[in-house]
Structures are given as structure tokens and as C-alpha cells.
Image (cartoon, rainbow, N blue to C red):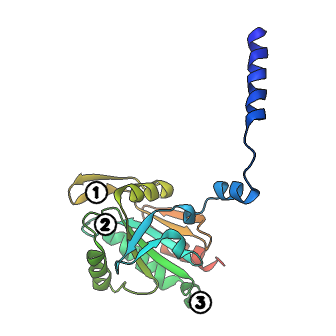
Amino acid sequence: MKNFIILIFSVLLLFACKDNSEKPEEIKAKTTDSIFLLDSKWQNQDGKEIQLKDLKGKNLVVVMIFTSCQTACPLLVADMKKVEGKITKDKLKNTSMVLITIDPTNDTPEVLKKYAQKRDMYGEPWVFLRSDLESTREFANVLAVKYKKITPIIFSHSNIISIFNKKGEMVSQEEGTVNSDAIAKTVNGLN
């Protein structure tokens, strides 16, 4: 009984000492699920430095790849092109198709640009991004994308395409064999 009273007293003391100086908007910002809250720095295919919040205002279709991949990534890239072709023209104006490399060491902006141009994916709505290893891993964790370096140029990785609304909140994910019709339907249904 004595231990129980000590426990109750300790809990009450913790609540009494809690700092309640946070403003409501600060609390809301901490509880939101927007990727735009990540403060990591990225480079696009043109070498321009951006943050994810710079993509705010457009719906995002996001996939993680690496350019030297000869197995799953070409399929994911083809899926992204199929999705782009099925998004209505008015929705496509408000959508960015984002490909993020899991191999920032080898996938420099120059490599990403050449990769995009070769696949006719350069310019709107296409965005290729790279960051440092830590930020790349953090973003992969947000998407639940698992990857592991097997050799200096080969990775084992998840095949996931994620959809985010204009606020950066995840709306949907497709894993494995991707249903491009379903992804386009989701994007076409967003504001």
C-alpha cells in the first residue's frame, strides 16, 4: 500500500511539473503526418537544393529507386510512367511524380538528369531527388521502404509507390506489382 501511495504521488508530481508552454499550433504541428515537416535538404536532377516542403501545394506520387538497378527499378519507373499517363491533364498540373534515389553516392544530380532525359522523364511533372545517406534512410522509414546495400552498386529494396496529398499527408500506397489504374484513380480523386 505504501508503494502504491508513492507511485500515485510521483505521477501527480510529474503532471504538476509538466511544461504546458507549447502553443496549440506547435502541438498540432508535432502530431501531423506531413512529410513537409522533415527538414532534410535534397538536390534535384538539376543540382538545385530544395526541401520537401518546396513540393507543397501539389499531390505527390513517390517511389524510391536507384539508377544502376537492372531488376525492380525499371519496372517501378515503367509503372510511374503508366500512372502519369492515366492521371487526367487537369490533375497532372497539380501533381509531381517524384523519384528518390536510395544510392545518393552514385546517383549525382548529373546521373539523375541523364537518367531522366534518357527515359523522357525530364521536366514537369517529373522530379528526381537525392540527399545524404541519413536523410535518405529517414525518408525511406517514413514510407516503410526497406533497403539494404548488397554491393557498392546493388541494393535489395521494397517496391512501393506512395501517394501524398497537397499537404504532404500519405493517402495511399501500392506495394509489389503496382496497379497503375488504382494509383491514377486515387490521384484523380484528390483536391
Secondary structure category for the residue under label 3: helix
Where residue 151 sits, quadrant-wise, is bottom left
Secondary structure category for the residue under label 1: strand
Estimate how packed mark 3 is, as few (under 14), some (14 to 19) or many (20 or more) residues with alpha carbons within 10 Å.
Answer: few
- Could you tell whether 106 is left or right of 17 in the image? left
At horizontal 33% and vertical 67% (from top left) the residue drawn is 73
Looking at the rendered structure, the number of numbered marks drawn on it comes to: 3
Residue under label 3: 90
Question: In the image, residue 68 lies at what x, y percent?
Answer: 24, 68
Quadrant containing the N terminus is top right
Residue under label 2: 66
Where residue 154 sits, quadrant-wise, is bottom left
Q: CA distance from mark 1 to mark 2?
A: 8 Å
Residue 42 numbered tag: none
Mark 1 is on which residue type?
A: Phe
- Could you tell whether 172 is left or right of 161 in the image? right
Q: Is residue 107 above or below residue 176?
A: below
The reply to whether callout 1 and callout 2 are in contact (CB within 8 Å) is yes
Question: In the image, residue 158 lies at what x, y percent?
Answer: 39, 57
Q: CA distance from mark 1 to mark 3?
A: 36 Å
Residue under label 1: 155
Q: Is residue 139 above or below residue 19?
A: below
